Image (cartoon, rainbow, N blue to C red):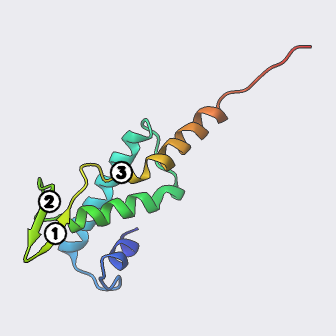
Amino acid sequence: MLEDLKRLIGMDSSEADPELDAKLNWILLSAKSRLKILLGGADPPEEMNYIVIEVAVARFNRIGSEGMSAQTVEGESLSFSDDDFARFAAEIQAFLDSQHSSGKGKVRFL
């Protein structure tokens, strides 16, 4: 996932920068841990890695702007979401629904 994150933020994924790699790995771990909470404690499946990476990109882009909801610099305005996972709510709910429905079975006696 680290290489994918580096590509998305415009870095050469083959370059090794131990300090930056440690920071990016922490961001990825933090995003994955939060997603795990949203999934009710279940480890996120590999199919949800894109959510972890997208949230990590958003978090990386906010470094230095923590706590702000909006910023305007020389006419350019940026606004930050309070919940980076909000845009993935439908996917998270679909996963939760599939987990609940797969554990339920029906027995019918005739």
Q: Residue at x 76, y 23 (%)?
A: 106
Q: Amino acid at mark 3?
A: Phe
Residue occupying the point 25% across, 72% down: 21
Which of the image's four quarters has the N terminus? bottom left
The picture places residue 35, in percent across and down from the top left corner, at 38, 47
Residue count near mark 2 (Cα–Cα under 10 Å), binned few <14, some 14–19, many ≥20: few
Q: Which numbered circle lies on residue 85?
A: 3
To which residue does mark 2 refer? 70
- Location of the C terminus (image quadrant): top right
The residue at 25%/59% (across/down) is: 26
C-alpha gap between disc 2 and disc 3: 18 Å
User: Dot 1 lies on which element?
Assistant: strand
Q: Is residue 42 above or below residue 17?
A: above
Do residues under tags 1 and 3 come within 8 Å of each other at their CB atoms?
A: no
Q: Marks 1 and 2, how far apart in space?
A: 7 Å
* Image quadrant where residue 13 sits: bottom left
**Which residue position is annotated with label 1?**
77
Q: Quadrant of residue 11?
A: bottom left
* Left or right: where 34 falls relative to 90: left
Residue 52 horizontal/vertical position (percent) = 39, 58
Q: Position of residue 85 (x, y in %)?
A: 36, 51
Q: Residues within 10 Å of mark 3 (few under 14, many from 20)?
A: some
Amino acid on which the number 2 mark rests in the picture: Ala
Local packing at callout 1 (Cα closer than 10 Å; few below 14, some 14-19, many 20+) is few
As drawn, which residue projects farthest toward the front? Answer: 75
45 in relation to 64, above or below: above
* Farthest residue, direction top: 110
Contact, CB < 8 Å: mark 1 with mark 2?
A: yes
Identity, as a three-letter code, of the amino acid under mark 1: Ser
- Which residue is located at x 11 percent, y 75 percent? 75
For marks 1 and 3 on the same chain, the one whose residue lies earlier in the sequence? 1
